[in-house]
Amino acid sequence: MFKSLFSKLVAMFIATIIFSFSIAGITLYYTLGVYVSEEKVRNLDLSGEEISKYLGIYLDNLGNPIAQVMLEYVMDSYRQNTGAYIWITNQKGIIVFSSPNVRLIDKRVVNNLKFEQGYYGLPDERQYKNVFLGIDPVIEKGDFYGLFKETGWSWLVVQKPFKYKDTGGDEQVVAAIYLITPISEVHKTRSTVYRFFLISIIVSILVSTSLVYFFSRKITKPLKEIRDAAKVISEGEFDKRLNINSKDEIGELAKSFNQMAADLERLEEMRRGFIANVSHELRTPMTSIKGFIEGILDDVIPQEKHKEYLEIVRNEIARLNRLVNDLLDLAKMESGELQLVYTNFNINELIRRCIIKLESIITEKGLEVIANFDEDTLVTADIDAIERVLINLIHNAVKFTPSGGIIGVNTEIDNNNDKVIISIADTGIGISKEDLDRIWERFYKVDKSRSLDTLGTGLGLSIVKNIVMEHGEKIWVESEVGKGTTFYFTLKKAKNAYKN
């Protein structure tokens, strides 16, 4: 039921809303009950204070019917306002005033009152003892010592002592005012408020659920698009792209997804190109080897030319061997298995040795080598790996520079960054702008006809870049067609650099 992210989000939000409102409702129910009860007691207490004033006027004007009418009117008014029975009793618990009339009260209550000399009174001394001790107010909850037992309800009784000065000027409690109401009446207010609260909760849950549904759908819809696009890409269709333009995390995810898809598409193109190039690089020498050997075995090639063709076969095998070794080295570099052995060495001296190693082909093409070295400086690097970089770059410069051209080799110290910048420049054919970004790709050759590179494997610059990157350094190229090319790379300067 809750397998999708959308259903889980909706269920989680709805559960959170219901749980939160439930906690709020329970808390409100109990706190509202306490508040309403306390507020009812306070209102009854204030009503008792007002009735006390008119009771005082009545006692001050005994025998005056107007004073009695005023007292009874006030009692009836507060009876209507509070919904409580109002009694005034003397010190013996006899009810001398009542609103409504005692006989109009619930018979189950009246039957429990005592009746003496034409007056109703409280039958149990506990029902009026405390109030005549001067406690103000006395609050009782329950059946009031059995008086309201037959009603089956719980009652709230607020008792107010009435103090009056006698002829000697002494003040004493001469009467008590009772304000009596069922607890159910007290809780009626709470129930009314709580009913409105529940209605508000239901409306809030409905509105919140609608909003949760809308926003959850808005969140999960782009995620579903990403999921569907991922399925398409997993099936090999790398041209799939997302059209999600939100500025939030999902928008960032979609942007990253599109970038990933573009990278995968490029990698797939590179993989296909790599396979095609490897196949081509392997097929060409193998076809030659097969043809020459079959020609020798079938006596198609004369005996006197066997040595010549076997030399060609040997060269093709050597080429295959270089290709396999370069592939293995490149695989180690890209997988991080290349182990560099860092030492301090003189980069200028290493460049001199590399030029000497390539002296024969440099002389053969009649090239001029111009070296412009900064002070002899130590660098920290793997000397064998850097020698391979230099040999490859200088060899490329020789290969693509026409006879009589110039090759420039320079070193420059960058003291601000503790680096040495090495550059190899030539006055060769140059590289076009569209080729510059691709020269680092495996098997990519600027000369599509390969006429200038019959022995190369097409992996040299890829290996060069990986070696420099493994050192944590930078390599870049500048070129202009017809004017030449310059390769630059950096190495870290050793701390104890010195001069010869």
Image (tube, rainbow, N blue to C red):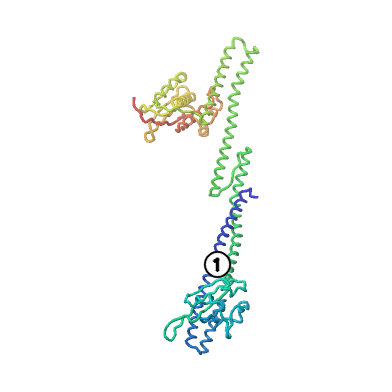
* Residue 57 can be seen in this image: yes
Nearer to the camera, 366 or 475: 475
| Above or below 82: residue 283 | above
Number of marks in the image? 1
Residue 495 image position (x, y, % from top left): 37, 31
Residue 183 image position (x, y, % from top left): 57, 71
Nearer to the camera, 69 or 383: 69
Residue 284 image position (x, y, % from top left): 60, 22
Query: Residue 102's image quarter?
Result: bottom right
| Above or below 314: residue 2 | below
Classify mark 1: residues with Cα within 10 Å, few (<14), some (14-19) or many (20+): some
As drawn, the residue found furthest toward the top would be: 304
Q: Quadrant of the C terminus?
A: top left
Query: Residue 84's image quarter?
Result: bottom right
Question: Which residue does the image show at 61% across and 82% down from the upper left?
Answer: 103
As drawn, the residue found furthest toward the left would be: 499
- Which amino acid type is shown beneath numbered disc 1? Gly
Residue 189 image position (x, y, % from top left): 57, 70
Nearer to the camera, 25 or 338: 25
Q: Secondary structure at mark 1?
A: helix
Question: Which residue does the image show at 43% across and 31% down from the upper left?
Answer: 490
| Above or below 311: residue 153 | below
* Residue 451 can be seen in this image: no
Residue carrying label 1: 33
| Above or below 229: residue 152 | below
Question: Which residue does the image show at 62% across and 18% down from the upper left?
Answer: 290
